[in-house]
């Protein structure tokens, strides 16, 4: 096994954690899909095979990217951004609806779906990292600095907002954190937030006053999730999902019920994705949950370590953005399942079933490893020269 790691360059710890999580995802997905079998039919093997295909595609993409020069990511950042906008626009008008949300593009002939926002999240972080370097001396200019940097954030988050408020909001916050690290003027960031709030209020007002336009098809869902959390916390009917998620965690105890022996996963919608953490704790216990949090923490630490070691600002911003994005998704999934947050659609990176999310996470890690590999080569050259 060790000899195969010779082909995997970059940060060894990130490779180990990534491969462990990918391998474990096969076990957990197979165990967590009973409700999907009930609703859509088929067998657990069908969904396991489908997930295995995504894992293989993700690993190939990660391996291919980690051998590339990070300079290519900066050069193609604008193209990636344009592709993100094109995919989101296509989804906006022609997207396939799942659970009343038109977030997916159906891939012809193969029967698989792709969530365009997963590509757009990474695309925005890559493009924003490039802009922060390119425009760093023009931040004080509204036309040459503010506009070019804020425009991509507004466009991407605005296109995602219609069908996926939680993702748009989280991506907006992560983007602003990257801006803060890039020393973007705080006054301009505050002005943008104020403008964004006003624009969101306007859209909501138009939706409520002109319901026939259906500007926000999932508005009622958003409101219900928040009000159910705040006002009807003990209402079994209104909070069945959240209460079952918490009960699953309680049933898990310290060592868990055992692989395949969880009961609440049969009543949790998307126990294999949005409520992954609850199903995980029920079957594998609190001890395994602590280990899982530890693995994600190490993953973030190693990514930030790579960011701080880089001598190029683009690579630093990219690493920080990706690291925070991955940890935020995992944290929100945990907080939803433990009842801290209202129900949202954020799954566990590298573990949950979901093709586009898994593949784009692998792509993001491939970029991180490419930067780490470049650092290794530079260190080797410097040591040989000395």
Image (spheres, rainbow, N blue to C red):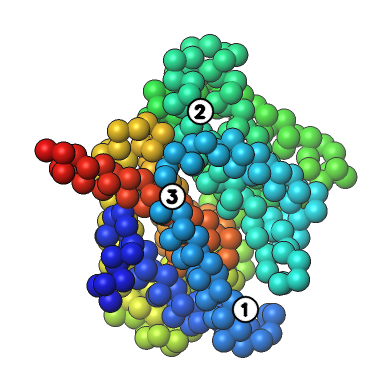
Residue 263 visible to the viewer: yes
Residue 83 occupies quadrant: top right
| Residue position for label 1 | 36
Residue under the point 36% across and 37% down? 316
Mark 2 burial class by Cα count in 10 Å: few <14, some 14-19, many 20+: many
2 or 3: tag closer to the N-terminus: 3
Q: Residue at x 44, y 73 (%)?
A: 25
Residue 266: give x, y in percent of width and height: 55, 81
Outermost right residue: 212
> Residue 233, image x and y in percent?
52, 59
User: Is 256 situated above or below 78?
Assistant: below
Number of residues whose C-alpha sits closer than 10 Å to that of mark 3, classed few (under 14), some (14–19) or many (20 or more): some
**Residue 264 in view of the camera:** no
For marks 1 and 3, the one nearer the N-term is: 1
Give the quadrant of residue 10: bottom left
Query: Which of the two discs, 2 and 1, sits closer to the camera?
Result: 2
Comparing 55 with 280, the one in front is 55
Residue indicated by mark 3 = 68
Placement of the N terminus among the 4 image quadrants: bottom left
**Which one is in front, 185 or 4?**
4
When the figure is inspected, residue 73 is found, relative to residue 201, above or below; the finding is below
Q: Which residue is mark 2?
A: 131
The residue depicted at 45 percent of the width and 87 percent of the height is: 260
């Amino acid at each position: 096994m060790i000899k195969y790691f010779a082909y995997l360059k970059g940060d060894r710890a990130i490779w180990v954690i990534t491969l462990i999580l990918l391998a474990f995802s096969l076990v957990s997905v197979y165990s967590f899909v009973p409700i999907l079998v009930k609703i859509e039919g088929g067998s657990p093997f069908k969904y396991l095979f489908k997930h295995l295909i995504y894992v293989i595609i993700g690993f190939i993409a990660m391996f291919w990217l980690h051998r590339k020069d990070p300079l290519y990511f900066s050069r193609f950042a604008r193209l990636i951004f344009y592709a993100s906008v094109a995919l989101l626009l296509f989804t906006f008008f022609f997207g396939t609806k799942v659970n009343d949300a038109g977030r997916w593009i159906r891939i012809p002939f193969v029967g698989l779906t792709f969530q365009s926002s997963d590509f757009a999240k990474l695309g925005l972080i890559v493009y924003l990292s490039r802009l922060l370097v390119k425009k760093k001396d023009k931040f004080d200019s509204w036309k040459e600095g503010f506009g070019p940097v804020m425009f991509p954030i507004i466009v991407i988050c605005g296109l995602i907002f219609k069908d996926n408020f939680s993702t748009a909001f989280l991506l907006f916050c992560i983007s602003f954190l990257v801006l803060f690290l890039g020393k973007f003027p705080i006054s301009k960031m505050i002005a943008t937030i104020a403008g964004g709030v006003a624009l969101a209020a306007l859209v909501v007002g138009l939706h409520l006053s002109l319901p026939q336009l259906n500007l926000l098809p999932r508005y009622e869902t958003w409101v219900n999730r928040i009000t159910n959390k705040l006002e009807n916390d003990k209402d079994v009917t209104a909070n069945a999902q959240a209460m079952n998620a918490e009960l699953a965690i309680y049933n898990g105890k310290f060592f868990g019920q055992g692989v395949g022996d969880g009961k609440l996963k049969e009543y949790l919608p998307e126990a294999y994705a949005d409520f992954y953490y609850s199903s995980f704790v029920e079957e594998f216990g609190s001890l395994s949950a602590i280990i899982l949090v530890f693995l994600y923490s190490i993953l973030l630490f190693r990514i930030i370590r790579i960011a701080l070691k880089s001598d190029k600002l683009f690579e630093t911003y990219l690493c920080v953005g990706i690291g925070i994005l991955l940890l935020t998704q995992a944290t929100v999934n945990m907080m939803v399942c433990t009842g801290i947050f209202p129900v949202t659609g954020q799954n566990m990176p590298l573990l949950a079933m979901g093709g586009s999310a898994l593949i784009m996470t692998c792509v993001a890690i491939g970029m991180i490893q490419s930067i780490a590999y470049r650092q290794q080569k530079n260190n080797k050259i410097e040591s040989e020269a000395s």
